[in-house]
Amino acid sequence: MSAISPDNQGLRLAVRYAVLVLIAIIFVFPLVFMVMSSLKPDQQLLADTSSLRAFLPVGDVGLNNYTAAFERAPIGLFVFNSVLVTGLTVALCLLVCSMAGFAFVYLNWRGRDVILSVILATLIVPFETIAIPLLLLVSKLPWIGWEGVTIGWLNSYRVQIIPWIADALTIFLFVQYFKGLPRELIEAARAEGATWFQIYWRVVMPLSGPVLATAAILKFLVMYNQYLWPLIVVQQEQYRPVMVGLQYFFQLNIAWGEVMAYLTMITVPVLAFYLALQRAFIASIASTGVKG
Amino acid sequence: MKLKHLAAYSLAAQSLALGTAFAQTPLTMWYHGAGNEVESAIINQIVDDFNASQSDWSVSLESFPQGAYNDSVVAAALAGNLPDILDVDGPVMPNWAWAGYMQPLPLDESVIADFLPGTKGYWDGELYSIGLWDAAVAMVARQSTLDALGLRTPTVAEPWTGEEFMAALDAAKATGDWEYAFDPGMAWTGEWYPYAFSPFLQSFGGDIVDRSTYQSAEGVLNGDAAIEFGEWWQSLFAEGYAPGTSQDPAARDNGFLEGRYAFSWNGNWAALNALNAFDDTLFLPAPDFGNGPKIGAASWQFGVSGSSDHPDGAAAFIEFALQDEYLAAFSNGIGLIPATASAAAMTENYAEGGAMAEFFELSEAQALVRPVTPGYVVQAKVFEKALADIANGADVADTLDAAVDEIDADIERNSGYGH
């Protein structure tokens, strides 16, 4: 086996960076295309698609598409609705699913494995197959609010949040992660007289940053991209999220520049959320990779 | 003292206003125009005018984006959450009526006697919906193109025959001046296919389904006429007359305007762009392939939901909306064909001598509504797939036979759809 010479090492590094740059370009290009297109009038946008100009801020660039997009749809309202629904769902999901994961890993109770299996089995059920039964259910559910008891959850924030709080994938992520934590920590805490909730809250959760970040990002994406469910349970504009709002831009003559401007604006919260949790997310992926 | 009087008058006025508001029975209405500023402004104006014009009913409007509208209505029907007044795409209406999402529209026939045939939505012998406008398709061309190719200008009275049309395409193709001689609009998938292309089939003598019974497509979608149509359709793509299913949507939107296509099969909604691009734009009638020239008909229409307790109130609103001034406002605003000749006369583009007057004439002379059956929503998708497959080179007879089987099976599964 020959030793790696400094030249070889440099070459390998160069190749590695070249590959990484290429991959980065592939992933970044759609975003660049979207942003650049949002700055161009439709005719130029369409003409540029057949050349590299599509990725460059050249020609007649400006913010007219953004102005027009704001005139076409209440974008602020849609973004607010999506951020509110997504934020609350993610927070509640992390709480509920981590508790469930904790109970499946650390507590001994009859039927635990069977119930976990049943929950995981729901992963293979596409949402589209349960959308209609779920719609019929939520349209008949009672609710206690400011107006007293009302029947039906349609046209509300709760109908977009509550059915999505618990989900099998997030529970599975927590179960897998908790199984990898040192058992001795839990036993030591038990020996010190800590309650199960104290162990969950003070011992396990502080060690769960990476899985919390991963679960949060995955759930955020699912919730922020919701289309079918809000489409069928929300008929009032005041509760519509961004993805249903996208339909406002698909008229008979589609204004592609406005579509791109709208997409650019609604992508900002997703990128901001990902960047905020990026370090923990990568740590989680890395720790998964080196396990075993 | 004056202040006291003023306060008293003000209080009395408010009470009267509140009294009126309370006396009005609330009606809800859903409309598909969210995102279209002009359309939304007009429909809001109609609602405001109606609410102010009488004291019995008060309509509140909820607008949906068009792409999400039908699914929202179907979901709301399942959840028992429909409004009083709906708008519905003409060919979808029989399905919604059959499914109970809509009830007959109690409107005196004399009110709509002068309306274009395509704007009236009948199902099972009863009026269910009425449109304020219609849409039409024409062969968009330029006079300079016809002159250069030595072609006669077809008219509604004397449209091109199928042979003349193909000769026109041959002439355009032979010059090499255009990327394609003809742009049927293959990039516009969905309802465009049955709306725009089934009239060609009907002009050949076929149809999507047998309209005498609506129980089968056998013989009409796979008979001799349909096969002749299918072979002609396939030749458009195989012989390089037209761009196929991989056509770029941008090319569809702008190809004719950029001079890439000699003839474009397009709707009146795109007519203004063509008029702005060329000062010699023509809107030619559909060619006659042997059984008369045909174009599609029926656009969005108003009706009463099946769950409304106030069909009389809903009908009162719809009748109010049918005034010529509103028909003209929609036409001027979004370019659609007003439902009556008197409204057309009030518009900029459809009045006699107007830039798009041909479309009104075409709607009157050539329009044929799509099959009036609840099964149309399925048949339209089957037809779309068959046409795309044939355009891509599939065997014509086999493809049409398979489409017939699929349509017949669906009709059987739904026990004949109530015909």
Image (tube, helix red, strand yellow):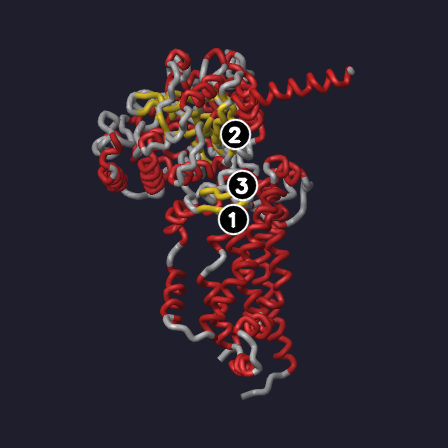
Q: Which mark is residue A158?
A: 1
Q: Is residue B279 visible?
A: no
Q: Position of residue B325 (x, y in %)?
A: 53, 15
Q: Which residue is mark 3?
A: A147
On screen, residue B53 versus residue B9, left or right, reads: left
Q: Amino acid at mark 1?
A: Arg
**Residue B292 point in image, percent of width and height:** 32, 20
Local crowd at mark 2 within 10 Å, few (<14), some, or many (≥20)? some
Which of the image's four quarters has the N terminus of chain A? bottom right
**Which of these two is toward me, B375 or A241?**
A241
- Identity of the residue drawn at 51% across and 72% down: A177
Q: In the picture, residue B48 is in which quadrant? A: top right
Q: Looking at the picture, how far across and down is residue B144, in whole percent?
A: 51, 22
The chain ID associated with circle 3 is A
Foreground label between 3 and 2: 3
Q: Which mark is residue A96?
A: none
Q: Which residue is label 2 attached to?
A: B61
**Marks 2 and 1, how far apart at CA:** 23 Å
* Picture coordinates of residue B129, whole percent (x, y): 39, 24
